[in-house]
């Protein structure tokens, strides 16, 4: 068998092993037929082609499409009325809502990473930047905004997505989404921060560096603050603000790595090796295929 991620391998995965259960943890089965989907596929000309403005009456029909086409990548978006179709752009449809999402990517920490940089480097040393940012964002969303339904998803490569599923979050305008994104990840390092947010950052920094805050005087904390501010979460704000943005389908295969986009049970314990590859799931021994 070839080691390359081919439509044939992907078709086998989506036919035999893919479950819609992870997807239904972040999008409701209610109004499923109004949900937009997009896919990276191989065209008849053997070229990669991205298609969107698709919808499916049931999760079963979605799985059937993905297995028949052997899609290279699968994405899910917002709800629209009437349901999206290839003949009708979503710009002509009534937007019904979309989950509030935060995207953390390791490449945004390249200036702090000492173990390696770039889109192809991920290791346990630098993964802590993702974990710390996720913990701060999760606590901020719960304590400062009152959200309670938050699901973390591994993107399949070098980052994670937070899906906020509360009804109020789904209905937020682009302006409101931008305000939340800026609060969580200020545009400027000199921007004033809420006191509770400052303390959250300080506690995280102290925990990571084995510092006892009770032993520090106020002026000591002020000296630390320059380093502490580096722990402010770095997110792709466009992902949060754009209420029609598509995101990878949980349970699907990342086309660059072959890893499964995975629901994270415990963000503190998760590392990318916990997400299996499509070859693992199908029982393909890569050593024997070389």
Image (spheres, rainbow, N blue to C red):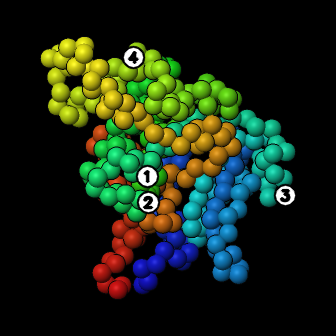
User: Is residue 149 shown above or below 80?
Assistant: above
Q: Nearer the viewer, mark 3 or mark 1?
A: 1
Disc 2: CA contacts within 10 A as few (<14), some (14-19) or many (>=20):
few
Residue at (48% x, 48% y) in the render: 22
In the image, is 181 to the left or to the right of 17?
right
Q: Secondary structure at mark 3?
A: loop
Q: Nearer the viewer, mark 4 or mark 3?
A: 4
Question: According to the image, label 4 marks what residue?
Answer: 196
Count of residue discs: 4
Question: According to the image, label 2 marks what residue?
Answer: 119
Q: Position of residue 66 (x, y in %)?
A: 60, 64
The residue closer to the viewer here, 192 or 258, is 192
Question: According to the image, label 3 marks what residue?
Answer: 87
Question: According to the image, label 1 marks what residue?
Answer: 107
User: Is the residue under label 2 in contact with that under label 1 (CB below 8 Å)?
Assistant: yes
Disc 1: CA contacts within 10 A as few (<14), some (14-19) or many (>=20):
some
């Amino acid at each position: 068998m070839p080691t390359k991620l081919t439509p044939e391998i992907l078709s086998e995965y989506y036919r035999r092993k893919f479950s819609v259960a992870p997807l239904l943890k972040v999008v409701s089965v209610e109004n499923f037929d109004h949900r937009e989907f997009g896919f990276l596929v191989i065209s008849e000309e053997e070229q990669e082609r991205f298609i969107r403005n698709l919808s499916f009456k049931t999760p079963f029909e979605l799985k059937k499409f993905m297995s028949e086409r052997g899609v290279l990548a699968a994405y899910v978006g917002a709800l629209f009325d009437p349901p999206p179709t290839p003949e009708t752009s979503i710009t002509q449809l009534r937007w019904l809502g979309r989950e509030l999402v935060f995207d953390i990517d390791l490449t945004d920490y390249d200036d702090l990473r000492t173990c390696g940089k770039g889109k192809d480097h991920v290791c346990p040393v630098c993964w802590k930047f993702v974990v710390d940012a996720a913990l701060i964002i999760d606590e901020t969303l719960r304590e400062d905004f009152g959200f309670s339904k938050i699901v973390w998803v591994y993107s399949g490569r070098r980052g994670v997505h937070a899906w906020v599923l509360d009804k109020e979050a789904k209905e937020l305008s682009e302006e409101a989404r931008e305000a939340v994104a800026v609060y969580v990840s200020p545009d400027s390092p000199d921007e004033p921060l809420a006191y509770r947010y400052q303390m959250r950052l300080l506690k995280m920094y102290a925990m990571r560096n084995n510092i006892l805050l009770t032993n520090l005087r106020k002026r000591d904390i002020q000296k630390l603050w320059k380093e502490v501010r580096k722990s402010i979460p770095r997110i792709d704000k466009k992902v949060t603000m754009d209420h029609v943005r598509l995101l990878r389908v949980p349970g699907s295969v990342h086309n660059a790595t072959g890893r499964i986009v995975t629901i994270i049970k415990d963000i503190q314990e998760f590392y990318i090796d916990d997400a299996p590859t499509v070859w693992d799931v199908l029982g393909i021994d890569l050593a024997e295929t070389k």
